[in-house]
Every structure is written in structure tokens, then in C-alpha cells.
Image (tube, grey):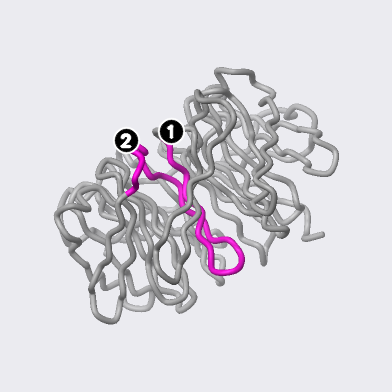
Amino acid sequence: MLILALLQLAASPGPTPARAATVVEYLLPRPRAFPHDPAVGRDGIVWYTDQANSYIGRLDPTTGQVTDYATPTPASGPHGIIVAPDGGVWYTGNFKARLGRLDPKTGAIKEYPLPAAARDPHTPLYYDGAIWFTAQGANLYGSLDPATGQAKLFPVATPGARPYGLVAGPNGTIWMALFGTNKIGRITAADGALREYPLPDPAARPRRLAVDAHGIVWYSDYARGQLGRLDPATGQVREFPCPGGGDSQPYGIAVGTDGRIWYNESGKNEIVAFDPASAHTETVAIPTAGSVVRNMAVDSTRARLWLALSGTQRLGRIDLAPAR
């Protein structure tokens, strides 16, 4: 464990397009830090993976203090991160085929080696006591029982599907982006069974997912610059062009406390807020160029959206409207 210096904060230097919201940036003190994914606990503490340095980072937004925890396996390349209901911080060791759990009270990390076939665990998800994960290079997904350390692996039938983003849905379902295809997968948590939903355009490449309060699945189509909407009840897909155009490369996505769909245009260095009721979009500029938001996390209690600004050694924060 290493406690680092206070962070530097910077707000946007001028008004952002179309709305009063701004991105507040937190410069991370570790040299060459590469925050890949963020997660936030019930206490408002923000956790993140520093993939380049193989650390798990902890940011206290109140004090600005950062504490780093080295992963037990060097160069494990921590990628995705979540905070489980018991407060345990789980991450995927993307380079070394393992999952890890950090105890926030002690800072101790316990690692769970995965079968060799799961060589590149990617996005983790807590669901009903198990840790689910994708492995895009291995073309599979799996679940780990923390009590036994045993993992179950499930291959994706579609070759080269690249299982990527993972998010919980209602009624025992887990949704998975198949980034190497124009498909989204629905996993039945009880048995791991997978149903694939093809998207209308063969060129579509869904990367990250979010599920709203109505069970609608939203996806960022990285290849085509589209925000997509899948209604699981009907199978109907609707798409909405990103404000930044076909080369905007939408990536991280989340449903905000304000009910809007927030996503990053990594090709334009902007955050977009989309209103499902009106289809109106508003944009917020990210102050530092080249940020690339690979993932984002919502603090529902404090109405905050946290961003991993991977390309600029920063985390970002947007203050949202209260829940509606």
C-alpha cells in the first residue's frame, strides 16, 4: 500500500456546449498512470485500475488523497473493476488470467487464478454472489464462486465474438456486448445459457452496455458512431446517430441519476447526455485532450458520474441532477 500526494483538480476552462455541467479532472500522482476502469462504493470512495503499473487505486473525493495497492502478481494488467455489496473490490487481471479481491478495510488482496483457457479476463460483474467476467481474446465468458475459488467457463458459439462489456439486467439476466460482431448476448445467470441478439447493421460493433430502469439495453456502437437501444421484450432495435458523427467512437456508457444515457465520444473527447424521452442530446467537453473514457461509474447516492480518463493520467467527475 502506498499513499500518494493530493491530487490536482481542474475544471473546464470555459463554458461547455449546450449545458452547464463540467468535467472536473483529478490528476493522478503516479507517473504514467493508466486508469482503465472506475468503480464507486456506497461510501463514495472511487476505486480504479491502473493497468499500466498493475495497481489498484483508491481516491477519496473529499480529501483528494490517493492510495495505491500493488497487485500480488506483477504485471497482471488490472482491467475491469467493481465494488461488491459487501464492499469488496474485485478486478480482472487481464494479462495473467486471474481475478482479485481487495479488502478495503485492510488493503489485502486475494487472487483467484483462472483456468488457462480464460487467458484475458476483461470486464467483471457481481451477480447473486458470483463474479461473472468476459474474456474477449479467448471468446468466452465465465463465473467465479468466491467461496470455493472454482470458475465455470462458457464458450461463445459465434467465432471471434470478442465478449466485452457486461452489465446486469432484470429477471436473472446478464447482458454482454459481443464487440467482434454485430450482436448483443443475454446470459441466463442460473445456468450460463446465452442467447444472441443480432443488430440490424452487419457493421455494428457494440462495445459497452447499460440497462435502464425499464430493462432497456443501451449500447455504444464504436465502429459506426451510434447509440443503440434494444428492447428485450420485442427484440426491436433503434439507433441514434452520435452528435460527433460516424467517427466519434462512442465507448463508455452509463445511465445517470437524471435518467439520461451518458456516453463518451472518444474520437471527439466529449461526453454526451442523451434523453430517451425526447432523443435530445447535450455535450460536455473534457478539458484535457486525448482522454478516452473506456468506462464510467455512477454514484447514485451523490448523483455523480465518474470517468476513467485513460489517455491523460486522470479521473473525471460530472455532477448529475438528482434521481427523477
Query: Where is residue 243, by image quadrant?
Result: top right
Which numbered dot is residue 160?
Answer: 2
Q: Are marks 2 and 1 in contact (CB under 8 Å)?
A: yes
Q: At which x and y percent is residue 264?
A: 58, 35
Q: Give residue 13's position: percent from left, percent from top.
A: 66, 29
Image location of residue 290, percent across then percent down: 47, 26
Left or right of 324, for residue 249: left
Q: Bounds of the magenta span?
A: 156-179
Picture residue at 20% right of the left edge, 49% below the top:
119
What's the residue type where badge 2 is placed?
Answer: Gly
Q: Position of residue 84 (x, y in %)?
A: 45, 71
Above/below status of 26 relative to 106: above
Characterize the local packing of mark 1: few (<14), some (14-19) or many (20 or more) Cα atoms within 10 angstroms. many
* Depth check, front residue: 208 or 141: 141
**Farthest residue toward the right?**
278
Label 1 element class? loop
Q: Nearer the viewer, residue 254 or 129?
A: 129
Q: Quadrant of the N terminus?
A: bottom left
Q: Residue at x 23, y 73 (%)?
A: 150
Instruction: Identify the amino acid type marked 1.
Output: Thr
Disc 2 secondary structure class: loop
Viewer-nearest residue: 163 or 201? 201
Residue at x 53%, y 38% (from the top left corner): 198
